[in-house]
Amino acid sequence: MAEKNSVPRWLSFALLLFVLSIANLTLAQTWGNPVWSDEFNGPQNAAPDATKWTFDIGNLGVNNEIEIYCSNPVGTSPAPCNSSTPSAYQDGSGHLVIEARNNGGTWTSARLKTQGISTANFQYGRIEASIKMPSATGLWPAFWMLGSNISTVAWPASGEIDIMENVLTAPLGANKTASTIHGPGYSGGNGISKVYTFPNNGTVSDGYHIYGLIWSPYLIQFYVDDPTNIFQTIPATAIPAGTQWVYNNNFFLLLNLAVGGDWPGKPDNTTPSPSQMLVDYVRVYKTTTVPGPTMTAASMNITAGGTGTSALNLTSTAGTGKVYLTCSNAPTNSTCTISPNYVDFTNSSTATATVSLATQAHTSTLRRNAKRVWALVMFGGTLFGLWLIPGIRKHRAGMVLGLILLLLPVLAVNACGGGGSSPSTPAPPTLGGTPSGSYTMSVTSYTVSGDQSTASVAVTVH
């Protein structure tokens, strides 16, 4: 007989289900502790950690900005950089201070980067910074990334990811930030961008806000204040046709406070000097392995020239997050697409998508006909050439002989049946379009950890 204080069987079963659900979530998307971070816990007035940050110095000649960037220690930084008024330092209270200062009409500031730091060369993950920004005319604070190959391929082929930037001019303002990607063919004013507006009349300077992204193969997601507060998702299919997705490579981080430039305009007498951009921390997370979903797809039967579709059913663990989908191994002269091109397992364990294959119609031109056309072209060209010879035009016999010679290529083509076939057996058609046959296409998924899964789609083209 069971004891009176034993746990009821139904409650044990419920507890087991709860534990299993928690276990599944930890297998889905668990970020854990940062794999790289700077908490800026150095002593007051200490320089930024040189094992984590380097500096750009001078006026970089970009965007018509007017600041002189200074390093700390000042080193080779040009005047008016001064070690007594550093442009980047730790405040002793757990913050990095990036300071823009007007030095008699010349503004100084700082631009920190992880370029050249082997431990801070990143590919994929969750990256965020907690920042309190100044809000004044002519200031341009930003937290962003550049492709690590920029020294060899230059910008914008390297790619740029602006996690956050702010100015007071439109379309932004004190209560808005922008997140943007720039690449070859869609850079500058043509970058793929979205504006975030703070709720409840919040502003960039009312306190520390978290600006971050979740970055995985072929997919970038931007968020503010919480990783679940994703306000922009950019898949690889969002870039303009004919351009390149350049964000599957390594990138380095940048923090800077620019002054002036084409976008914010010049500072004026309302711009505080100094103006400070305060950074509480910068953190980079890597999730545990997130397996790709289980995928099944129906077969397709298509008549060349038509479009076939297949229902793709996906199953994963709730909490996996967004998963990018792509297809490959499509038949010659056909185009495969998937809609939607990413699915979301944040709150669900199932999803569906549609795989479409657009094919090209067959052509029916015979090889014999092609050779006949070529022979006629030769005939016309030779006839014209002979007509230019005065002697031929004056003698009837010469004309007859010339015509016989000209007809020989056509007669030879007909006699040979168009290149190898007998007259009674026409040559097989040389078909264009999508060839008939049986094919196996592949659908590949990419999770937030970069892990993949695949499914096969059987295709028959008639």
Image (spheres, rainbow, N blue to C red):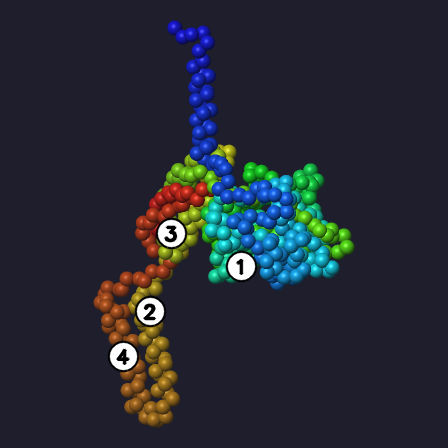
Query: Quick one: 234 or 408, which is closer to the camera?
Result: 234
Within 10 Å of disc 3 (Cα), the crowding (few <14, some 14-19, many 20+) is: many
Above or below: residue 403 compared with residue 264: below
Closer mark to the observer between disc 1 and disc 4: 1
Question: How far apart are the alpha carbons under marks 1 and 2?
Answer: 46 Å
Earlier residue among tags 3 and 4: 3
Earlier residue among tags 3 and 2: 3
Q: Secondary structure at mark 3?
A: loop
Earlier residue among tags 2 and 4: 2
* Residue 453 in picture, x, y percent from top left: 39, 42
Q: Secondary structure at mark 2?
A: helix
Within 10 Å of disc 2 (Cα), the crowding (few <14, some 14-19, many 20+) is: few
Q: Which residue is disc 4 drawn over?
A: 408
Q: Which mark is residue 156?
A: 1
Closer mark to the observer between disc 1 and disc 3: 1
Q: Tell whether 170 sits left or right of 388.
A: right
Q: Tell whether 273 sits left or right of 438.
A: right
Earlier residue among tags 1 and 3: 1
Q: Which mark is residue 330?
A: 3
Q: Which residue is disc 2 drawn over?
A: 370
Question: How far apart are the alpha carbons under marks 2 and 4?
Answer: 17 Å
* Tag 1–tag 2 contact (CB < 8 Å): no
Above or below: residue 87 compared with residue 366: above
Question: How far apart are the alpha carbons under marks 1 and 3?
Answer: 31 Å
Question: How far apart are the alpha carbons under marks 3 and 2?
Answer: 29 Å
Query: Quick one: 447 or 329, which is closer to the camera?
Result: 447
Which amino acid, by three-letter code, is at mark 2?
A: Ala
Q: Secondary structure at mark 4?
A: helix
Within 10 Å of disc 4 (Cα), the crowding (few <14, some 14-19, many 20+) is: few
User: Residue 317: in sight, yes or no?
Assistant: no
Closer mark to the observer between disc 3 and disc 2: 3
